Amino acid sequence: MIASFAIFLAMLLPASGSQEPDPHKESFGSTPDGKPVDVYTFTNAHRIEVRVINYGGIITALRVPDRNGKLDDIVLGFDNLAGYLNNKPYFGAIIGRYANRIANGKFSLDGRDYTLAKNNGPNSLHGGSRGFNNVLWRADPFRNRQGRGVILSYLSKDGEEGYPGNLDVKVTYTLSDANELLVDYLATADKATPINLTQHTYFNLGGEGNGDVLAEELRLNADRFTPIDKDLIPTGEIRLVKGTPLDFTQSTRIGARINDPYDQLLFAHGYDHNFVLKAAEGRLQLAARVHEPNRGRVLEVSTTQPGIQFYSANFLDGTLVGKHGHRYKQREAFCLETQHFPDSPNHANFPSTILRPGKTFHSRTVFKFSVQ
């Protein structure tokens, strides 16, 4: 997860002599303390459109054509800022300082114990009470040889939510004409600290608000997963998926086995598990492929991370009113959160998530859209 910060920034320099305009920017409202929130819209040559706000780095819309060329928004969310200010499902947000759960909100590092904000029963979830999904990021739109997008920057101060060190974070969204949305994460710290960054978009390839995703077909490039206990905390075991309802090594309908009486599905009320990817960490690899058979949309997810969390939106219950008045119900979306493993600071056998001074964290995730 260590890469050259300078090399990555050089990739973002505008093309020589380019006169093309930046992505479109407009107001999206103000935070309760009066700070302006903006939405950035960028579109590629094939009409794919991404909308991102600088509050939480949230992807509020992603419009993608189906096999007949019809554009639909395929991500869940809200029509206005008010919904995102109380965004309990983390729709579309950047997650940090530590994605997923840390057991009992505690970890030890270099002989010192740290206590985190607990916001998920006894555990810390997705960075705590005020994670990266609830902060205002600096936004710098760009357009270059790779595509168009926005660079989001945030300084997480020493002690924020209980984490050590000042953490300087940059997340770059780039939409290319190859129909790829690239998400690059960069971070440096002045003290050793755990870091686990991800993107928490809820996808429905049939269109948001258009029913459940149980007929969508998923394949994961993972033959192992990290089992959880009743509090959704990894036990430390790394288990083969073979012979379990978590085997997506072949393309399988999301709903094919979701109600099987398997302890892991009962604990999570469906799928909410970290899958161990086959290739080595740091190498960009295909992690997941989803196909929606009715409209033909295909999503492929590649990443340099060692794991991916597959979540079948088990805790949506119809009480949230999203875009266009849609009430989002259970299993009407899925998340594919590329990541290090949950609770890694408390499991020596998991890949390390510790970023140390003088090192640079860099990971990349690519969401590629096509039709079949």
Image (cartoon, rainbow, N blue to C red):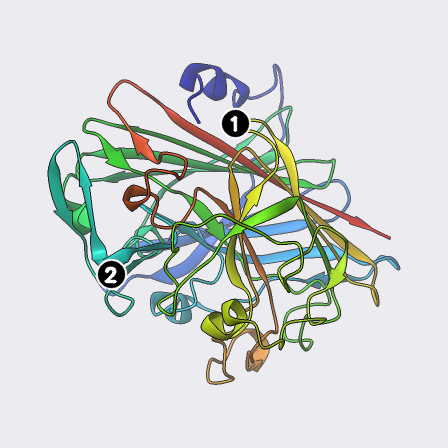
User: Horizontally, is 316 left or right of 87 in the view?
Assistant: right
Identify the mark nearer the N-term, 2 or 1: 2
- Relative to the observer, which residue lies in front, 310 or 49? 310
Residue drawn at the location 74% of the way across and 48% of the way down:
47
In contact (CB < 8 Å): disc 2 and disc 1:
no
User: Horizontally, is 170 left or right of 203 in the view?
Assistant: left
Q: Tell me the kind of residue under disc 1.
A: Gly
Residue 273, percent across and down?
50, 58
User: Horizontally, is 352 left or right of 142 in the view?
Assistant: left
- In the picture, the quarter occupied by the N terminus is top left
Q: Secondary structure at mark 2?
A: loop
The quarter holding residue 365 reads top right
Res. 49 in view: yes
Q: Which residue is mark 2?
A: 129
Q: Is residue 179 above or below residue 264?
A: above
Q: Which residue is mark 1?
A: 282
